[in-house]
Image (cartoon, helix red, strand yellow):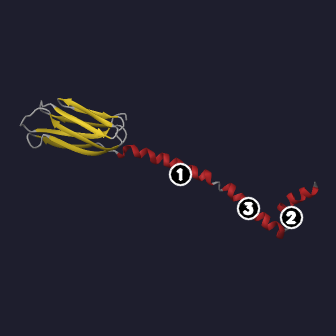
Amino acid sequence: MRSSQTPATSPVAGPAPTSAPVTDARVSSGPVVTTTTSTVAASPARGSNVAAAPVQPVVPTESYPGYLQQPDDATANYSFSGQGSMEVSASWTSSSILSLTVTCPAGTQTDEGPSPVTVVLPDADGACGATLKETIVQYDEVPYTLTIGPAEGG
């Protein structure tokens, strides 16, 4: 029993030449415990959570002014990259009836009527397209503004 106590005490206060390798092993195991990389790795995980917050605002709201006019410009097409819940709306000042169709990998939705028309897609991830068109043949110019962006509250 004392012999087991002596080796335990020896490395701490034992002969220097023999304890040096043992002390080195303890010193190297000490810093491993001290430099627990898992604690340091936890900080980047927090940083990645912080970095995830700016990902939501990456999708800016974009506005595209234009006009529709029969016979050559009765339809306008816009491509966009959807992320999460997206809202596409069109507004104009005349009494014209327009149709807005939004197509994304998760589905297609259409709204038709007087200004404004709005389509909300809860899962618009991927390549999407918006088509605004006149529903009644009229030869007057119909100026509009198409707005594409993240859905409110989404």
Percent position (x, y) of residue 73?
12, 43
Say which residue label 1 marks.
44
Q: CA distance from mark 2 to mark 3?
A: 15 Å
Q: How many marks are shown on the rendered structure?
A: 3
Say which residue label 2 marks.
14
Rendered-image quadrant of the C terminus: top left
Q: Between residues 149 and 136, which one lies in front from this camera angle?
A: 136
Amino acid type for the residue under numbered disc 1: Pro
Instruction: Find numbered disc 3 in the image and state the secondary structure of the residue it sits on.
Output: helix
Instruction: Please indicate whether residue 18 sits to the left or right of residue 70 in the image.
Output: right
Amino acid type for the residue under numbered disc 3: Val
Q: Is residue 29 above or below residue 141?
A: below
Instruction: Please indicate whether residue 140 sits to the left or right of residue 58 in the image.
Output: left
Q: Residue at x 83, y 60 (%)?
A: 12
Say which residue label 3 marks.
27
Q: Quadrant of residue 139?
A: top left
Q: Is residue 74 above or below residue 111?
A: below
Percent position (x, y) of residue 54?
41, 46
Q: Residues at badges 1 and 2 in contact (C-beta under 8 Å)?
A: no
Q: Quadrant of residue 13?
A: bottom right
Q: CA distance from mark 1 to mark 2?
A: 42 Å
Amino acid type for the residue under numbered disc 2: Gly
Sequence-first disc among 1 and 2: 2
Number of other residues with Cα within 10 Å of mark 1, as a class: few under 14, some 14 to 19, many 20 or more: few
